[in-house]
Amino acid sequence: MTTAIAVPTTSVGPVKALAHGMVLAGRNLRKTLKSPEQLLDVTIMPLIMLLMFVYLFGGAIGGGDRDAYLQMLLPGMMAQTILFATLGTGVGLCTDITKGVFDRFRSMPIARSAPLFGAVLGDVIRYVASSSILLVFGLILGFDITTDPASAVLAVAMTVAFGLCLCWISAWVGMLVKSPQAVPGVMVAFIMPLGFASNVFVQTNTLPDWLKAFADIQPVSLLAEVNRGLLTGGPVGGPLLGTLAWMAGFVAVFYPLAMVTYRRRMR
Amino acid sequence: MSNAIEAEGLVKRYGETTALDGVDLTVPAGKILGVLGPNGAGKTTAVRILATLLRPDAGTARVGGYDVLRDPVAVRGLIGLTGQYASVDEDLSGRDNLVLIGRLLDMSKADARTRGAELLARFDLSEAADRPVKTYSGGMRRRLDLAASLVGRPRVLYLDEPTTGLDPHSRNEVWDIVRRLADEGVTVLLTTQYLEEADQLADRITVFDHGRVVADGTPGELKRKISGQTLQVRPTNRDDIEIVAKILLDLTGAQPSRDVDSGVLNTPVDDTMLVSAVIKRLDEAGVGVDELGLRLASLDEVFLAITGSKEGARA
């Protein structure tokens, strides 16, 4: 076999960078497919939460009407679940760094941002799996999609896109902390308030004013509203704009932060 | 002959600690340089700088003619890295790891698979090719690490402690691979804590201690430079040992060391002509010897002499 001797290049163009990012995303996909147990954290946990809230607290919160509560809860839980699923991105990145996998990549002539992008894109399958499984399980429990299948698909897509934007926070944290085990500890400070101080589990008019003010405008609540509109009917436009604004904001702030921290850590 | 690696005055500090304190390194193309030193001597830091993974605080380094700071991408196109820090993905199979690296080096899917299979066969990993790397033994794992660094046919290879923690059999396998690569014209920079390894593989050895180069030369030069040679005498009759010791003391001016069990006397000598004088005196004294000879100091003795005396000077 003859091979042309590679001519050294001095920079990596954007097209190649994208190609490298896709190859690395493929690596994460392959890992998930080869050991599907990696998906347990984003599937079983949300299912248990769903069961708990419907049958344990649902009667109390929903005033005895569990079915109506499920109709309100499930679209919101999709938003809350994706928030938790972003945790994995930071853990994965931090693991790659501490195990030296990133050093291998960085000693190769590929774009510096490719490993980071690859990791984020590679998590798409986790997000899709977690949202779809939750939705299907909800249907089994008696959730009723009152709109149409296309809207339901749109709700899943919107949720996944939301996860892809929010996961830059997790990526940033993954770059900051020394060990992968520390990622969830840091992320909890951000995930718990967003996940629970929201309209996912309760009507916000039951909250004290200051908390209601926060819960009404924060991204998880807004996405929950979008999903409710898409799955069970109702206005979508207003919450959608708000959600998109949050998504753009998260990328605008945390993507550069993650990048800078990544570059600094790799000195 | 041109140099594949040239580094001058490399300095790297981490807060208060100075990992590298002005290190110069030169490796001619196609040669093996052994960087020898204890843990924390700065070997890995030097490799990371030369592999563009770390920026030096001062100094310059060129690999294949490209500056590591100004043309890092060009440098990365020339090098392969194996070591404590550059690793493969343990969740993927050996084959998937190699194909992944091939794809990142812009090979087509088919080419990446071919190259991967080639390397798996060459490193005797074909049978385990589709098992996750976490199930590999230490030796297999190290061979895969090596294979991973060779996917792009690098002209310069960094091996950071490639045999640390391996059993003697696996270590010999890695040594054979390194020798074959050198035969193919690959320039190798090898760090190691094992003197024997440097002695076996390297054309030249640079000894690091506390972030500085404390000695440099061919293995033979180092042995001569540091301790000169050792004269070894074993009298036939153990009772003569004191007479022999007296003779050696007279001629060298130093008290010889004794190995009581074997009845051997050792003394360092600078002048090999001394040997005939020793023989003459032994003859006059009527002392018979079973063994009398000169040998080069072992690299272990050299290493201890260099790093030990440095330690003493600092204290």
Image (cartoon, coloured by chain):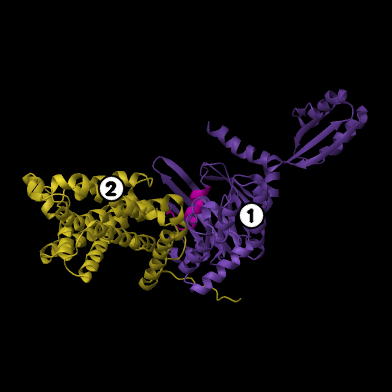
Chain colours: A yellow, B purple
Task: Provide the major secondary structure of the magenta segment.
Answer: helix
Location of the N terminus of chain A by quadrant is: bottom right
Q: What distance separates the C-alpha of mark 1 from that of mark 2?
A: 43 Å
Q: In this view, does B54 lie to the left or right of B210?
A: left
Can you tell which quarter of the image residue B242 is in? top right
Query: Which numbered dot is residue A77?
Result: none
Disc 2 secondary structure class: helix
Q: Percent x, y for residue A172?
A: 30, 53
Q: Name the residue under label 1.
A: B174
Figure label count: 2
Q: What stretch is highlighted in magenta?
A: B43-55
Q: What residue type is labelled 2?
A: Met
**Image coords of residue A141 (percent x, y):** 24, 56
**Is residue A75 visible in this depiction of the protein?**
yes
Q: Residue A187 carries which label?
A: 2
Residue A157 percent location from the top left of the image? 25, 66
Whether the magenta-drawn stretch holds residue B203 is answered as no
Q: Nearer the viewer, mark 1 or mark 2?
A: 2
Q: What element carries label 1?
A: helix
Q: In this view, does A19 lie above or below B266?
A: below
Question: Crowding at label 2, few (<14), some or many (≥20) Cα neighbours within 10 Å?
Answer: some
